[in-house]
Amino acid sequence: MYVYDEYDQKMVDERVAQYRDQTNRFLAGKLPAEEFQHLRLRNGLYIQRLAPMLRIAVPYGLMSSRQLRKLAYITRHFDRGYAHLTTRQNVQLNWPLLEEVPDILEELASVEMHAIQSSGNCIRNVTSDQYAGVAQDEIEDSRPWAEIIRQWSTFHPEFNWLPRKFKIAVSSATQDRAAVQVHDIGVRILNNDGVTRFEILAGGGLGRTPVIAPVIRQNLEPKHLLTYLEAILRVYNRYGRRDNKYKARIKILVRAMTPAVFAEKVDAEWQTLKDGVGTLTDTEISRVKGHFTIPPYETLDDHVPEIDDRIADNSGFSNWLKQNVKPHKQAGYAIVNLALKQTGIPPGDITDKQLETVADLADEFSFGEARVTHEQNLTLADVPKRSLFSLWQALVSAELATPNLGLLTDIICCPGGDYCSLANAKSIPVAEAIQRQFDDLDSLHVLGDLDLNISGCMNACGHHHVGNIGILGVDKKGKEFYQVSIGGSGFEDASLAKILGPSFARNEIPDVIQKLVNVHLDKREGAERFLDTYRRIGIDPYKQAVYTS
Amino acid sequence: MNQLIIDLEITTDVTGPLATLAEFLAADQKPSAVLIDSDEDIESIKEFAATLSVIALNFPSFLDGRAYSSANLLRREYGYKGELRAVGDIRIDQLEQMARCGFNAFQLADGQNIEQGLERLQGFSFSYQPAFNREPLFRARAS
């Protein structure tokens, strides 16, 4: 993974000092709250319903065991012994003290971490594919490009006060695990006749007005990546709306200008930057790529007979293997997912002890690294197949082996009304009620892949628009209600979910989901996925089942 | 008289009144100093950039980031060499970002401490991205 040099370290150290100064001035009454609000947000600190919330940046979700242990220490020492993984591959603390945040940042900086630009109207933490570097369908490792974008966007002086927040995702595999079509900018890495080229999408997003991003540039040479991004950001910074925060995202600008005109405008700006000082050098590309080399894999047989024996006499292991373990591009290795979706625990929450266990297991089985996924789970990307059974046993003891990855109960869920001051409704109890309704693992496996996403408000942190089933918390005269939509996808076949009809009370939701699932089981052809059945038969049968019975 | 920071020194403003962009564009005899608001088109003064000695860019609110891009265009693309002044809602925590975009003069908002502003002006030791008079860090790393 990327390791800081003296320059990177100095930047985060200077940021800690700068933020400490801002916090001290605020606490001394010398920095007005309305100004400090925007300064602290650019450092990931929100003031929430019950306490502040600190969002720690995890660039493209990648962490070392040392960083995991530091997070465990921080949650224990400065918080309540647990952390929350987010849909943007970051980590959140729910109970830090505002006056202790500079100390937390100093701890983070000691392990090459920070909270820079994890909120505010600026370029946020860049996200990528959690299987980067190990996926069988990968074209090229996306992490070096994500790291290059991370550095470019860090403290960008011109783009720190944008009309609205700005999110960039990078994907480089046939399957899009980074949801590039619903980001402000999506970077797709492609291979054209043996050379790397980028396809750039702009103006996608969720929130109040969900939009699938159009492609605005094809066949971009890698060395031009940063100058092209700069051109997009400059056009957005100059022309994006600032009069209405609900119309301030780049998607509104791209739509208003039309993608073609927006692309022309960006191109005209880019012509003034192209081949200039911001053009990436081969030296820099090689330097960053040099941090993402292939780990020292052993030469192993891809088939491990011991696994067959274990499968035969252990259904727990067998279920986990089938659902949570994915194929690896290196023979004899596997990608292991730790689904943090155990019933009764808020989706994405992980305790200090579990963080330490993951660190130990990463050291023992996966070259000391782990990844946060945008589905709020963790991944150990490089596990030798012969160690899978031992790893599974250790994960079972740590309650990290729930075998529901990608299934209905692997719910993406924002913190909602339990924590967030923006929320219209709670989301965690809804997730739990659904998990309790669908507690039979065999039936879930029969049902197959089904993404269920819950957001507590229109800001769509739970990505409800791209759930096969999406649930949105709404406020009706001070009461919590839930709008259900179906048919969304955040992957390469991206689509936005359609609203079924009038919203439901919270206690009705498990039954509504059951009815939707029943329609699917009734109408599916063979082992068809929920999404494919819906696309084939349309929304009416689902509506009918939910509203007329 | 107003106090300003110009080129890392605290000084008194001796420029006199600034022409608005409308006045500037309408004038037969072009003034040497102009004030441009954040919603006004910076491109309209491109052809006059070489003859101006003071361009003041207004920040109606510290949250309005448009003038950072105007500064970039003036310095990098239009080759403007004169004084580039930030005026309006200018807070000391943003000065170093403004400087890296090419501002060299700052008229702070009421209540801001100008000495503290001067201390915070230089900010970070490095710049990951190209900035005014600075190559991106990746070029420095290589040399």
Image (cartoon, grey):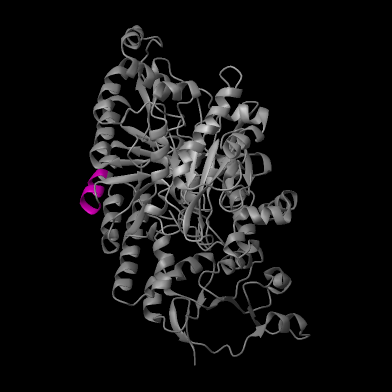
Position of residue A81 measured from the top left corner of the image (x, y, whole percent): 24, 46
Does A150 sit above or below residue B33? above
| Residue lying furthest bottom | B1
In the rendered picture of this protein, how many numbered marks are placed on residues? 0
- Residue B41 drawn at (x, y percent): 69, 70
Instruction: Residue A544: give x, y in percent of width and height.
Output: 63, 35
Name the residue furthest front.
A549
Horizontal side of A333 relative to B36 (left or right) equals: left
Please state the extent of the stretch shown in magenta in the rendering.
Answer: A72-79
In what quadrant of the picture does the C terminus of chain A appear?
top right
Image coordinates of residue A200 in percent, x first then y, are: 63, 42
In-front residue for pair A345/A53:
A345
At 63% from the left edge and 70% from the top edge, which residue is drawn?
B80
Work out whether residue B56 or residue A429 is closer to the camera in this orientation and state it.
A429
Residue A194 seen from this side: yes
Tell me if A38 is positioned left or right of B76 in this view: left
Residue placed most toward the observer, A138 or A318: A318
Q: Is residue A74 magenta?
A: yes
Relative to residue A45, is residue A519 drawn left or right?
Answer: right
Prevailing secondary structure class for the magenta stretch in the rendered image: helix
Name the residue located 36 percent from the left edge and 49 percent from the top edge. Answer: A92
Vertical order, B57 against A100 (above or below): below
Q: Would you identify the image quadrant in which residue A45 lies?
A: bottom left
Please report the residue visible at 71 percent of the width from the left and 73 percent of the height from the top: B45
Where A199 sits versus A472, above or below?
A: above
Indicate yes or no whether the magenta region holds residue B119: no
Whether residue A139 appears in this view of the structure is no
Quadrant holding the N terminus of chain A: top left
